[in-house]
Amino acid sequence: MNLNRLARIDLNLLVALHILLEEGSVSRAADRLSITQPAMSKTLGRLRDTFDDPLFVRSKRGIQPTPRALSLAGELKSILGQVDGLLDAGEFTPAAYRGEISLAISEYVGFTLLPPLSARLQSHAPRLRLRTITRAERQLDQLANGELDFAIQIQREEYPPEYSVSPLADSPLAIFVRQDHPLVAQTLTRTLIREYPQVALYVADREELIGGQVLARGLFESDRGILETSHLLTAFEILRETDYLLICPAYLARNEGATRDIVALTLPLDMTFSVQYSLIAHRRTEHSPIHQWLWQEIIDTVQSMRFRIVHRG
């Protein structure tokens, strides 16, 4: 560690670089920092001198980061978060917390979980910014390097020891089709199901998560083609207009608004399968009060949802 060099660095420069990377605009970055655009341009000049790199070049869309700037972006957020933690004095209270937490969550899980979770956050942590990401590959790597704080994913068979894993819920899969689909009046078999095209919902890290489980059972195979999407409502609209079928968690059928004119059919016994969803975090967050608080809030939200479902009968 070169302490002499660090002593010459203005920490505000790193904050400015982080905001420039987020905004992609000198003027918008100046607005966020409540300084003038000339002052922001001067700050960018100091950044260029510090890193001996242009960092950004002008384009029709604003300023574009150089490879050097992009290489800094991956660690910058984590470093600033750690510095912020050092400066955070006093007892942690969710209501006073100001900051951003990122969560990787598929749309079909978020469709059910995020409304009640958002209600809890609005009540207990109104200044928290929760950023949800529906398409994120290499989730374990992103959790480790700080690009993600949490992930809700289909549970893997094994996790490295540096990850915390909390099972949330499991759900059987079902076949969703429009209510007058030809399959509704038939006895379902694997061969018959393969005769219809499928909509496949995007699953992050599919091979690592469910390779050897769902895929090996031939659930997501069709002789008539497959259309993949990460947008659940789009998938349901396709079902309403076509003979496509969708194999996904059966719990989605409880949302009568989203599944209007759509029915859920039980898979044949030889294709019956349930998926386990779990909450994942890296050990880098285990001593962070906000991360530990939100971890428990997510778990409690899922448990309260399951309680309501059981008592509704």
Image (spheres, rainbow, N blue to C red):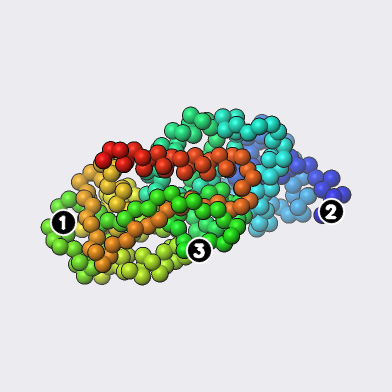
Q: Nearer the viewer, mark 3 or mark 2?
A: 3
Give how far apart the Cα atoms at labels 3 and 1 are. Answer: 38 Å
Name the side, left or right, on which 229 lies relative to 256: right
- Write down the residue under mark 1: 184
**Quick check: can you spot residue 112?**
yes
Q: Secondary structure at mark 1?
A: helix
Nearest to N terminus: mark 3 or mark 1? 3
- In depth, the one of 96 and 227 nearer the eye is 96
Q: Residue at x 22, y 49 (%)?
A: 262
Instruction: Work out which quarter of the rendered image holds the N terminus and state it.
Output: bottom right
Q: Amino acid at mark 2?
A: Asn
Q: Residue at x 23, y 68 (%)?
A: 190
Q: Secondary structure at mark 3?
A: loop
**Quick check: can you spot residue 135?**
no
User: Tag 2: Cα neighbours inside 10 Å, few (<14), some, or many (≥20)?
Assistant: few
Q: Is residue 137 above or below residue 30?
A: below
Task: Give the percent coordinates (x, y) of residue 163.
Answer: 57, 56
Nearest to N terminus: mark 3 or mark 2? 2
Give how far apart the Cα atoms at labels 3 and 2 are. Answer: 39 Å
Task: Give the percent coordinates (x, y) of residue 115.
Answer: 40, 38
- Write down the residue under mark 3: 158
Nearest to N terminus: mark 1 or mark 2? 2
- Write down the residue under mark 2: 2
Q: Residue at x 24, y 64 (%)?
A: 269
Q: Quadrant of residue 223?
A: bottom left
Q: Amino acid at mark 1?
A: Val
Asked if labels 2 and 1 touch by Cβ distance under 8 angstroms, the answer is no
- In depth, the one of 232 and 140 nearer the eye is 140
Name the side, left or right, on which 220 lies relative to 26: left
Q: Is residue 220 above or below residue 148?
A: below
Q: Amino acid at mark 3?
A: Glu
